[in-house]
Image: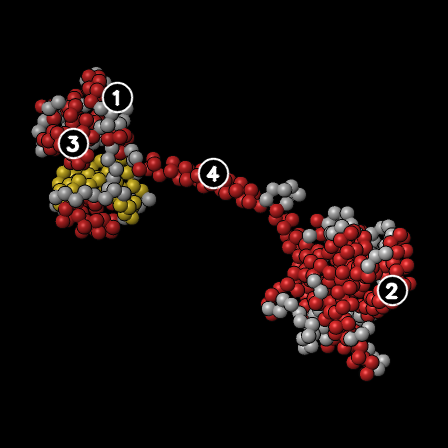
Amino acid sequence: MKKCEEIEKDLPLYLDNALPSAEKQVIEDHLQSCPQCTKTLARLSKTRTMVNNLAEVEPPAWLKQKIMTRVHKEAEKKSLLRKWFYPLRIKIPVQIFATVCIAVLAVYIYRAGEERMKEVVPSSMPAPVAEVQKSSLPESKIKTSADKALPGEEQSIKIKERPEEMVRQADVKAKDVNKQIASGVKADEYDGAPAVKSFDLSGTDLEKKKESSAAMKAGGTPPMQSSIPKPNFLVRAANVNAAATEVEKLLVKYDAKNIVKQVAPARVTLRAELKNRKMKDFTERLGTVGMVEERVAPGTEENIPVLIEIINN
Amino acid sequence: MNSKQRGGEDEDLQYVILCRKGDANAFDVLVERHQKKMLNIAFRIIGDYDEACDVTQEAFVSAYKSINKFRGEAKFSTWLYRIVVNYSKNRLKQLRGATKNADICLDDLGELTTKGKNNPSLIDHSNPGTQMERRERENQVQRCISSLDEEYRDVLVLRDIQGFSYEEIRDILNIPDGTVKSRLSRARIALKDCLIKVIGDL
């Protein structure tokens, strides 16, 4: 026979009728002869009844409302999530879409930039050469044997008419040559090559070849754009010729030297050498002639070579 | 008591499916069906009506959020009750941790939070004297339930108050059958001893 303690352990389950029949029988046998355990069973039963009788609480009316309010919020979130993260019902997160968008945008911007570059680059390489070729060149006083030394007409013009400008870009050695050219010394007394080299990047060899062919077909060589200086000022005026005359007057007024004028249809190019201290005033007065665009800042030497291009607006 | 919950088919399932499809209104039915039981489980575990309401709310919202995780291995209600039991246990730990009242002293006869001032259903309208007596008795029982170890209390609440079967308790608490029985056995003995201590002879 089991002890009371062991019986007591099983009594709660006996109460539930949850014991195997053999154990149940043992307990029933014990209870008949044990008032202590019978009392315990009664107490357990009473306990269960008391617990069972605990009143149920009713949910407040707002509980469901509150729950449903929050559930609807969650549902919105869920549907938003579905919209953003699975827009095509494929599990492609929105980040991938963003990445693709950025990539497309980047390509687009790159393309746009390229087009703009195309616009900018050619205009920064103006074609005074072509104009020079077309122009009658009445001012080219020093049309000397340099023509023979140089491949084409335009080359000779460059040397004669824009010596100072060339000098600025040239190395020291070439500068000497050019200065002498500028000061009226005959260009043919010198080897044309160094002078050309000073402002032409195409190199001595090429120049020499051109030299040799220059005598046979003067003026037939292709324009050499790399040697063309950019205009310092671009003046837009309604009447190009009138404006050119105005500018010319201005240059004279400000003691400009070596004024060279080249006329082409709808375009006049003026070259001159200005004193540094007159530069500022001249720039200001230039504004009265037309719309001035300063392209390349003039140098800072004593005598500044300037190139003014006047075009029709 | 829980006879309505029995039966071969889970009547909640169609609403669960609707919820999964995004129909939040279908959840309304589920709340309506189970809120009372959820609240009572929480109330008896925690011993505080307001906290129980809050926990019930949290449990339902949490259930909705993770409704896709319900696999239908057990009944939906069982799954819901498991959530509310866990939330209640956690809330009780927080509350006890916060008040540093880890052990509820049986000799402490101060007012328990189970007082039914917020709960109209606890008020018996028959007789003022009986009502007082009954409320006092319920307070004592609840206090004893609250004094039980966590694992005993859960089983006792589910079995003796909510009337769940051993199988349901096993599923809700996710413990073996034998453990359900042994815990229930000890819980009843402990509760009986507690009540004798508090009330005197039963």
Q: Which mark is nearer the camera, 3 or 1?
A: 3
Q: How far is the residue under mark 1 from the one under mark 4? A: 44 Å
Identify the residue under disc 1.
A220
- Mark 2 — residue? A34
Labels 4 and 2 positioned on one and the same chain = yes
Q: Residues within 10 Å of mark 4 (few under 14, many from 20)?
A: few
Three-letter amino acid code at the position of disc 2: Cys
For badge 3, the amino acid type reads: Asp
Pointer 4 with pointer 3, Cβ within 8 A: no
Q: Nearer the viewer, residue A42 or A73?
A: A42
Task: Tell me the SS state at disc 2.
Answer: loop
The foreground one among A173 and B117 is: B117
Which quadrant: the N terminus of chain A? bottom right
Pick whichever of labels 1 and 2 is earlier in the sequence. Answer: 2
Would residue A74 be found to the left or right of residue A51 on screen?
left
In the rendered image of this protein, does residue A138 appear above or below residue A298? above
What's the chain of the residue with tag 2? A
Of circles 1 and 2, which is in front? 2
Tags 1 and 2 touching, CB below 8 Å: no
Instruction: Tell me the number on the disc at residue A171.
Output: 3
C-alpha distance separating marks 4 and 3 = 43 Å
Q: Pointer 3 indicates a residue of which chain?
A: A
> Residue A107 got which mark?
4
The image quarter in which residue A182 lies: top left
Q: Please tell me whether mark 1 sits on a helix, a strand or a loop.
A: loop
Amino acid carrying label 4: it is: Val
**N-term-proximal mark, 4 vs 3:** 4
Q: Residues within 10 Å of mark 3 (few under 14, many from 20)?
A: some
Query: For the residues marked 3 and 1, what is the alpha-carbon distance in whole angstroms?
Result: 28 Å
User: In the picture, residue B169 is in which quadrant?
Assistant: bottom right
